[in-house]
Image: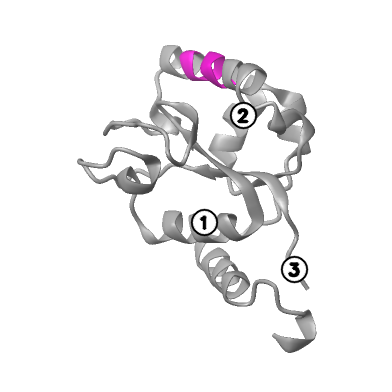
């Protein structure tokens, strides 16, 4: 039995970064980020990172070190991010409108996406939205370990 598939997975960026990273996979660091990436790789055809600086970025996009945290953005920086997200959704990532989307986004990141495009944000599949970090990590680890197995064999 294969796990449920999605067209797109949305993962939030992290505050922890490698100064020499040049793609989201080499820039962002930390166990939670790595775990979400591994989980999303099993379940989605396209993985996008939602960044406080870059908006929505492909996991192989060129990026550079930055120090921005979404809840700490000035109103002007947040407004620029919302415009960037709106533009990216409309021009680059049409799958967010038409496809099945799995979201790992926190409340703050989901709120920014909602502000940019309410209809897209309301369609996201968010099965982990109410879980505290530790239970979330346990669930994701278990789902990665047992991906593709019939539930009776887990």
Q: Write down the residue under mark 2.
A: 113
* Residue under the point 71% across and 55% down: 127
**Highlighted magenta segment, given as a residue range:** 80-85
In the foreground, 132 or 86: 86
In the rendered structure, the answer to whether residue 35 lies left or right of residue 66 reads right
Who comes first in sequence, dot 3 or dot 1?
3
- The residue labelled by disc 1 is 36
SS class of the residue under badge 1? Answer: helix
Relative to 64, does residue 33 appear above or below in the rendering?
below
For label 3, the SS is loop
Please state which of the two labelled residues, at mark 1 or mark 2, is closer to the viewer: 1
Task: Answer left or right for 71 relative to 142.
Answer: left
Disc 2 packing (10 Å; few <14; some 14–19; many ≥20): many
Tell me which corner region of the image, top left, top right, bottom left or bottom right, holds residue 128: bottom right
- What's the CA distance linking mark 3 and mark 2? 30 Å
Q: CB under 8 Å between callouts 3 and 1?
A: no
Closer to the camera, 120 or 136? 120
| Residue 129 visible somewhere in the drawing | no
Distance from Cα at disc 3 to Cα at disc 1? 19 Å
The answer to whether any part of residue 47 appears in the image is: yes
* Relative to 41, residue 48 above or below: above
Residue 105 on the magenta span: no
The secondary element bearing badge 2 is classed as: helix
- Residue at horizontal 26 percent and vertical 34 percent from the top: 65
Judge depth for marks 3 and 1 and give the one in front.
3
Q: Classify mark 3: residues with Cα within 10 Å, few (<14), some (14-19) or many (20+).
A: few
The residue pinned by badge 3 equals 2
The quarter in which the C terminus is drawn is bottom right
Q: Residue at 42% of width from left, 16% of height from top?
A: 77
State how many labels appear: 3
What x and y, as percent, mark residue 51? Answer: 45, 33
Main SS of residues in magenta: helix
């Amino acid at each position: 039995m294969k796990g449920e598939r999605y067209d797109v997975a949305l993962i939030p960026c992290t505050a922890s970064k490698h100064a020499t990273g040049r793609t989201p996979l080499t820039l962002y660091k930390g166990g939670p980020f790595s775990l979400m990436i591994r989980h999303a790789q099993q379940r989605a055809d396209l993985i996008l990172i939602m960044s406080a600086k870059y908006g929505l970025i492909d996991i192989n996009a060129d990026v550079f070190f930055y120090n921005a945290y979404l809840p700490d953005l000035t109103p002007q920086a947040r407004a620029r991010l919302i415009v960037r997200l709106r533009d990216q959704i409309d021009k680059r990532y049409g799958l967010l409108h038409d496809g099945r989307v799995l979201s790992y986004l926190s409340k703050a990141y989901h709120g920014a996406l909602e502000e940019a495009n309410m209809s897209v944000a309301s369609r996201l599949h968010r099965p982990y939205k109410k879980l505290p970090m530790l239970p979330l990590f346990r669930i994701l680890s278990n789902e990665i370990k047992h991906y593709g197995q019939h539930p009776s064999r887990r």
